[in-house]
Amino acid sequence: MIDPNLSLYPEKPAAPIASPLERALGRLGRVLRVTMAFALVVGLVAGVAGYWVSRRPHPPTSGEVRVGALDGPVEIIRDEWGIPHIYATTTHDLFLAQGFVHAQDRFWQMDTWRAIGQGRVAAMFGAEEIDTDRFLRTLAWGDVAAEELAQMPDFERTILESYARGVNAYMGRRSPAELALEYVALEASNREYNPAAWDPVNSLTFLKVMAWDLRNNFDEEIDRAVLTSDFGHEVIAELYPPYPADHPVIVTGSGPAPAIGELSPPPALTTAIDQVRRNIEPLDSVAAGGFAGLGSNSWVVSGSRTASGLPLLANDPHLPAQMPSIWYEVGLHCMPRTDECPWDVTGFSFAGAPGVVIGHNDRIAWGLTNLNADVMDLYIERVNPDNPNQYEVDGRWVDMEISTERIAVAGVDPIGLTVRRTRHGPVISDDFSRLESFDTDTAVRLPSDYVITLSWTALQPARTFEALIELNLAGDWEEFRTAASKFDLPAQNLIYADVEGNIGYQTPGRIPVRRSGNGAFVAPGWTRDYDWTGFVAFDDLPSVLNPPKGYIVTANNPVVGANFPQLLGTDFAYGYRAARIDELLTDIEDATVADMQAIQLDSLNVNAIEMMPYLLEIETAASGFAEAKEILADWDLRNEADSAGAAIFEATWRQVLQLTFDEINDDDVRPMGDGRWYAVIAAMLRQPDHALWDVLATPQVENRDEILRLSMVEAGRDVARLLGDDADGWAWGDLHTVTFENQTVGQSGFGFVDDRFNRGPFPVGGGSSIVNATGWDARGGFEVAWLPSMRMVVDLGDLSASQAMHTTGQSGHAYHAHYQDMIEPWRLGEYHEMLWLRQDVEDAADQTLRLVP
């Protein structure tokens, strides 16, 4: 019996997860932080001079500006939130103006994302980013984007060119210091850097970065390789349990969700897998990818269930917190609308790319969530021991494709890079020591000389930009599906509603068809048995129009059951959010925008529903336990920010995961605490003597109740240590906070500087795999790692009644009024009107800027 008053485990500081924005663009800031801190401490303390320097980049948003290459005048009306509504008479002028306003508010963000997409981070930030560029150049996104542009129809290419002219029209008249305060600091470490003119290819590479950020299976494939070595395949099946039978799939179907499968990689592979992970870490540090719990919610409700008699569409994409927001809200309107200028659309865009990504026009609305399709596979390639540039295919040696790159580095000479590619894709495991022995008793025999390659749909030219432009112009279901057929990547769930009352769902994306296997594990590359043989035809992808139940829900859960003839993937979310949304929609009648907003903010902890009966059975004499248990007993199971019960439960949940899986030494595969782990622990709770309950660090054998008892005691101590001994003052939001950090400054260590660029911490409700998905990582502390990056509800019965809010603000300038003005309303679950009619925009006008030829 474990003494509940005695902690057997050395206290591991709940080191917060790498701050969300250090994940987003953290490494970019390391060189910058010291120089920026010095420059800003001096400059900002300098009073009037500092005031002038910090506000110098603020753009003109009223009056008149002359811009070359315009066909006619353009009017940009900004509302109280700084959201621009652009009115132009030609398509060229409309997108030139969008490029202009993106550059006004977000050019530093655009420039840093461009550096990532092009693999030119070291040219901007110095030698510390060479490893980042090595991997980026290996993926060759810039080359792929250039191919896409060359293959693009004239209509879409012209839009990209017009947008680039608008970006250049703004940046061409201003020095770097007038574009963003960050350039003042950058000059201290890189006096040679001047932002290059914007190129259409730069907009396309951003879509590649987003595809990387939204990947899923690639990381799971790596994790399974490591866990298989530690536990064996039988335990892996328990750590990746079947999709819960009572949780919904998106499109009606029967049978369980696809299972992981049986192909098991050799234990000796883990050394190479570790190298792959190390090689991708520089990229993950500048792009916000690799969160196992990352996802999004969307749903659409038929008019048969709404007060207006027409559909409601809701969407809240979950992405890592960052400053400024990844989203930029904008309205694009032709005045008048003609065949040559057909645009009338509003919603959310990416700074750096023209058009609207999520939103509505005058006929349809659409939303996106991550499909979690398996579009990335890792292959072990057998290498010729006498020639490292040859690999085996069907028993013979074949030459790799070899290319060389020159990586520009700020302050020093360029360095060379050799990139090797096989028929499966680029080699991503270079620079690891070859293993001399391997396990011959597993499904995959590991060669003594080998590399690991990556097959990924994003490494081939795609038509996603064409799809986005066509979505902006679609007027009905068929035009929507035509646009979706070109949405090659990242693979998404697309939901649809129109003013005629139709609702629909479409799976888009380039989904591989494999000769055998399901892509869940690293596969042998020297045989063609696991090769891709093509892609699922668009007409064979799941789709539904006006389902009988009157609504459609997507929350990264499986699209179809296992009986569907095409394999889309195996690593879907476990459906806890989807099941809760489905439950809330099942009995809804006369739904309104407010009802959809209430669902987006729902904080019911479905994990607690499963665990609480077991926790409330636990008894112990440990100090403070009775009070904590009483709080749990009175808890309404909702993770509201002011809830003491949520604080105790989530602290207990973290302890359960850490104690139960103490034998996992690799921090990257330890439990994050998202929905998959809900399912793992739920199955174990019904087996009180399951072997995984035992803590290997102790001589005795623990069971379920011992672990729950110790977890509750340790959780109470954790909460008291962090929030004080007075339980009346405990609140989940005091543990569960979000800090929005500037994308490159991050944590400089100079509080004076941080306070001006970062915002937070802010208390929030919600949690992982909760509808209000403010996810946190149980491997660290309770801080928010990813969140609803925006919330939108579109009313097809009255487009002017649509509502939205994103996380930070429209501006990327730290001292601007619109740098942080959306944080508090977002935190409180408030929304603003998505202005639509011209008269409403004019009535709400805060500032108006005219661009004239």
Image (tube, rainbow, N blue to C red):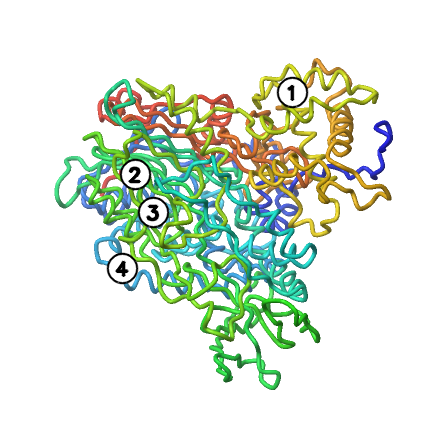
Residue sitting farthest toward the left: 339
Residue 810: tell me if it is visible. Answer: yes
Residue 78 in the image: x percent, y percent? 33, 29
Amino acid type for the residue under numbered disc 1 = Gly
- Looking at the image, is mark 3 or mark 1 earlier in the sequence? 3
- Looking at the image, is mark 3 or mark 2 earlier in the sequence? 2
- Looking at the image, is mark 1 or mark 2 earlier in the sequence? 2
Q: Nearer the viewer, residue 814 or 637?
A: 637
Q: Residue at x 63, y 56 (%)?
A: 233
Q: CA distance from mark 4 to mark 2?
A: 32 Å
Of tags 3 and 2, the one toward the viewer is: 3
Amino acid type for the residue under numbered disc 4 = Met
Of tags 4 and 2, the one toward the viewer is: 4
State yes or no: discs 4 and 2 in contact (Cβ < 8 Å).
no
Residue 434 in the image: x percent, y percent? 67, 73
- Looking at the image, is mark 3 or mark 4 earlier in the sequence? 4
Q: Residue at x 49, y 82 (%)?
A: 399
Query: Which element carries disc 1, helix, strand or loop?
Result: helix
The residue indicated by pointer 1 is 645
Residue sitting farthest toward the bottom: 386
Amino acid type for the residue under numbered disc 3 = Thr
Res 65 label: 2
Res 42 label: none
Query: Which element carries disc 2, helix, strand or loop?
Result: strand
The residue indicated by pointer 3 is 507
Label total for image: 4
Query: Which element carries disc 3, helix, strand or loop?
Result: loop
